[in-house]
Amino acid sequence: MKAMCVVGARPNFMKAAPVIDALRRYQDVQVMLVHTGQHYDHQMSTLFFQELGMPKPDVDLQVGSGSHGEQTGQIMVRLEPLMKSERPDVVIVFGDVNSTIAAALCAAKLGIQVAHVEAGLRSFDRTMPEELNRILTDNLSDFLFITELGARKNLKREGIAEEKAFFVGNVMVDTLLKHRERASALRVSQKLGVQAGTYGLLTLHRPSNVDDEHTLSEILDAIDDLSKRLTIIFPCHPRTRQRLSTGAHAHLLTKESEGGRVRLMMLDPLGYLEFLSLMADARLVLTDSGGIQEETTVLGVPCLTHRRNTERPVTVEQGTNVLVGNSREAIVAAADKALTAAALHAGVPDLWDGKASERIAAILHDRLAALSR
Ligand code: UD1
């Protein structure tokens, strides 16, 4: 059996790593890894491959940045001849980025089986590019691996045959549990001069938050307020750095408190292990990422999400996640509540146990072997 895994952007790498490992344990499975090059920086890509011990991609399509149509189209143009010549039995795609839909569409049109890892999540907000990628990828997929049970209902509602969906747990949690101790030994906050358990960790990159000047100002004003109480560490995504480089917000980014404490510490994007170390030791995480909502739930760290909806409702129902939107007032009030609340009673969702990728590999191995008989 030949499996082609296609990855492209930062949140794909930690999902693909354990699946590749699990597939490679089967001697009759050949795994090929294709990087679309959607993310290409050392900090956004290469570093993750190194830290996660991933094999070097067999092929790098080097598409780079561009508009959605351009990026998605270019990935397809470059993938099609490769899929035609390699003829994999299955193409495995991850998450909801442009590389995911491009690879799924390319494979489906060539009659190749498509497996989608992290299927069935829905924010019900079609203004998010990721939501369109999710809906379309799921509709094209033959194997839909789901992380939470609500996803099954979402797929059913869209008319996707129930037997295609497999509840396997969360591959990102496989990676987190595997690397947690190594990450914690790095003691990144200490190296930054901030005591564990006393700081907030911020990430921000969603176009709806950072491309709109008013929204970005509301969030940064809230962060400014909050930074009077605790240091905020802010590893900054390239998209956000570009927006901030205009200077309109510079005064917020360089302040120190009276005692000489740095209020907001802006950093370049961090590697997987460094970020995990900071997340595990944070008093509070503030984010608009999808994956971080899940990771904080597993770590038991309070998470405020700067969005009005989430495609990962289990993190709110069972985990530590609170949706706070993006108004200054709401963020400050929610942060206040989180900082003064007694200990959290959050649980870890079903099957987020570190074994999701083993389940995926076993299902693919058995089903594809049966098909070829
Ligand atoms: C993409 C995903 C998003 C995911 C995010 C994580 C889509 C539609 N979006 O958004 O779901 O949460 O990745 O980061 O696929 N850039 C660099 N270096 C890089 C890559 C990008 O500097 O290695 C800059 C470029 O200026 C680029 C911008 O970041 O224009 C945005 O990159 P892009 O891949 O278009 O989307 P993300 O915002 O990263």
Image: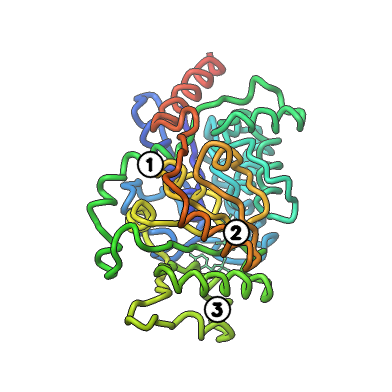
Residue at image mark 2: 306
Residue 2 screen position, x and y as percent: 47, 31
Q: Nearer the viewer, residue 342 or 125?
A: 342
* Amino acid at pointer 1: Thr
Indicate which disc, 2 or 3, sits on the residue closer to the N terminus: 3
Tag of residue 175: 1
The residues tagged by marks 1 and 3 sit, at their Cα atoms, a distance apart of 32 Å
Residue 232 screen position, x and y as percent: 43, 68
Q: Nearer the viewer, residue 79 or 296?
A: 296
Residue 191 screen position, x and y as percent: 25, 67
Q: Nearer the viewer, mark 2 or mark 3?
A: 2
Residue at image mark 3: 244
Q: Nearer the viewer, residue 314 or 80?
A: 314
Determine the quadrant in which ligand 1 lies. bottom right
The residues tagged by marks 2 and 3 sit, at their Cα atoms, a distance apart of 18 Å
Q: Nearer the viewer, mark 1 or mark 3?
A: 3
Q: Nearer the viewer, residue 214 or 122?
A: 214
Q: Identify the residue at image location x=49%, y=69%.
A: 226
